[in-house]
Image: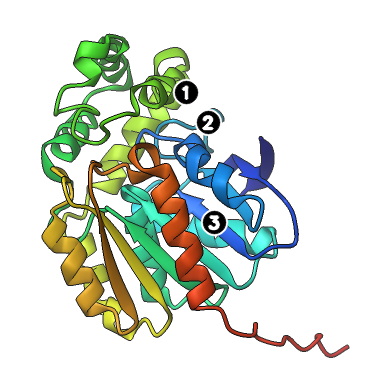
Amino acid sequence: MDQIELSAGTIEYRDTGGDGPVLVLLHGLLMDASLWDGPIAELSADYRCIAPTIPLGAHRHAMRADADLSLPGIARLVTEFLERLELYDVTLIGNDTGGALVQLLMGEGIARVRRVVLVSCEAFDNFPPGLTGKTIALTGRFSPRFFGLFMQQMRLRMLRRLPIAFGWLTKRGDAASKQWLRPVLTQSEIRRDAVRMLRAVFADRDLMLTAAEHLPSFDRPALVVWASDDRVMPPEHGRRLAELLPQGRLVEVEDSYTLVPLDQPLLLAELIHEFTVATSYPPVVRQPPLL
């Protein structure tokens, strides 16, 4: 994993390198960049894949005390990340809360993004999302110490697989979810970050409704990939998002829960590749700055 120092603190990221088109892939709450390992394994031969571990509770480096860990604050951190790596013509991809971040950035009309992919994510009034999200939001009311005690229960597979944990998020990704919990189980400073982040993220329950108001003005290609069996992110929301976006297209994926990168990585990689090829056109020519 590479590292970069941003205004909020040190961010780790995976960068496959290469000269291919750039894909930037964002994960959700209590997850890290490894969410995307399966799709990246398929896509890295043709694309430069960059997956940051953003401070959503499974990061390994504590953020600064004054870091803005609200969802808009983390969206600005993603923008800073793109700028610092000098990335242009990006395909920005988000799953779970990563998709919520993508929607916030779409509303800002971020110039470095050429197209977006939304994969089963928070939208509209589903915030916090479903039983899983509501449970996670409630844990943010705990002190960091009691939050840590609560999360210790997730060491047991039978508890991780409950609907209030990861049971309705992934059909096949228990090994990954176990790994994601390690930072909050072992690092007190990450527990403090996680509690602060959860309180800030869910402080505005209307945030995604407001974000949806700006989506019709997003004038670039958008692919919406939704799990047809999703119990946390309503499939109807995928259809509504695709209808709101002027260049939106919907694909529903069977035999998957919310975390499609874990449950159907090969199919998701194929969909991303087909979409990127189908919407490719000459990049914007940038003039050198005047001296």
Residue 134 is situated, as x and y percent measured from the top left of the image, at 14, 38
Q: Is residue 69 left or right of residue 214?
A: right
> Which one is in front, 252 or 87?
252
Q: Where's the N terminus, which quadrant?
A: top right
Q: Is residue 273 left or right of residue 234?
A: right
Q: Nearer the viewer, mark 3 or mark 1?
A: 3
Between discs 1 and 2, the one toward the N terminus: 2
Residues at circles 1 and 2 in contact by the CB criterion of under 8 Å: yes
Q: Quadrant of residue 58?
A: top left
The alpha-carbon separation of the residues under discs 3 and 1 comes to 27 Å
Q: Which residue is rendered at x = 56% and y = 78% of the image?
A: 280
Residue 166 is situated, as x and y percent measured from the top left of the image, at 25, 29
Q: Is residue 135 left or right of residue 267?
A: left
Q: Quadrant of residue 243?
A: bottom left
Specify the amino acid type for callout 3: Val
The alpha-carbon separation of the residues under discs 1 and 2 comes to 6 Å
Q: Nearer the viewer, mark 2 or mark 3?
A: 3
Q: Which residue is rendered at x = 25% and y = 15% of the image?
A: 146
Q: Which residue is rendered at x = 49% and y = 46% of the image?
A: 39
Residue 251 is situated, as x and y percent measured from the top left of the image, at 28, 63
- Residue at the disc numbered 2: 62
- Residue at the disc numbered 3: 24
Specify the amino acid type for callout 1: Glu
